[in-house]
């Protein structure tokens, strides 16, 4: 299901997936580390530095804003790529739609930005 912008025939889908490795969580931990990060269009230098930082800090829950999907390439999906790299569950929802761009082959691609939650815990 998703929101539909009838003027543009755009469907703003909610998306979620799981890349958790199945490794057990450390149940002796009494606290969760939560990391909030505005990555504005998947980062000035791409996703790799963002993934490196998140790997270094090892948060249990990550709140991302301005995550792009389909903006630099049709297959780009920032939330999914970060979740897969960190072996986390994720949920992504569109916050706004940017102007479509032409990718050099004159194909118009939909570009969305939104918010994502990534977690080492199971999303229900």
Image (spheres, rainbow, N blue to C red):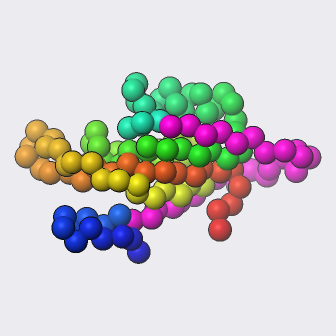
Q: How many marks?
A: 0
Q: Position of residue 57 (x, y in %)?
A: 69, 30
Q: Residue at the far right: name it.
A: 28
Relative to residue 78, is residue 14 depicted above or below? below
* Horizontal relation, residue 21 to residue 91: left or right: right
Relative to residue 85, is residue 119 depicted above or below? below
Main SS class of the magenta portion in the image: loop
- Asked if residue 78 can be seen in this view, the reply is no
* Horizontal relation, residue 75 to residue 106: left or right: right
* Horizontal relation, residue 37 to residue 107: left or right: right
Which residue is painted at 42% across and 36% down in the image? 40
Q: Position of residue 123 (x, y in %)?
A: 64, 62
Location of residue 35 by image quarter: top right
Which residue is painted at 75% across and 40% down in the image? 33
Q: Residue at the far bottom: name it.
A: 1
Q: Which residues are magenta?
A: 13-38
Q: Quadrant of the N terminus?
A: bottom left
Which residue is painted at 45% across and 64% down in the image? 14
Q: Position of residue 25 (x, y in %)?
A: 80, 50
Q: Residue at the far left: name it.
A: 106
- Asked if residue 114 can be seen in this view, the reply is yes
* Horizontal relation, residue 71 to residue 60: left or right: left
Relative to residue 93, is residue 82 depicted above or below? above
Q: Nearer the viewer, residue 47 or 12?
A: 12
Q: Magenta stretch: residue 8 in it?
A: no
Q: Magenta stretch: residue 22 in it?
A: yes
Q: Nearer the viewer, residue 87 or 121?
A: 121
Q: Quadrant of the C terminus?
A: bottom right
Q: Nearer the viewer, residue 58 or 68?
A: 68
Location of residue 94 by image quarter: bottom left
Q: Position of residue 16 (x, y in %)?
A: 51, 61
């Amino acid at each position: 299901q998703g929101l539909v912008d009838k003027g543009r025939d755009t469907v703003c889908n909610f998306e979620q997936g799981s890349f958790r490795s199945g490794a057990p969580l450390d149940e002796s931990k009494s606290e969760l580390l939560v990391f909030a990060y505005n990555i504005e269009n998947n980062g000035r230098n791409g996703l790799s530095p963002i993934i490196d930082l998140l790997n270094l800090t090892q948060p249990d829950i990550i709140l991302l804003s301005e995550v792009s999907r389909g903006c630099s390439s049709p297959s780009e999906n920032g939330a999914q790529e970060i979740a897969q790299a960190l072996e986390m569950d994720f949920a992504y929802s569109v916050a706004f739609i940017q102007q479509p761009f032409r990718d050099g082959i004159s194909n118009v691609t939909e570009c969305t930005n939104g918010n994502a939650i990534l977690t080492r815990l199971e999303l229900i």
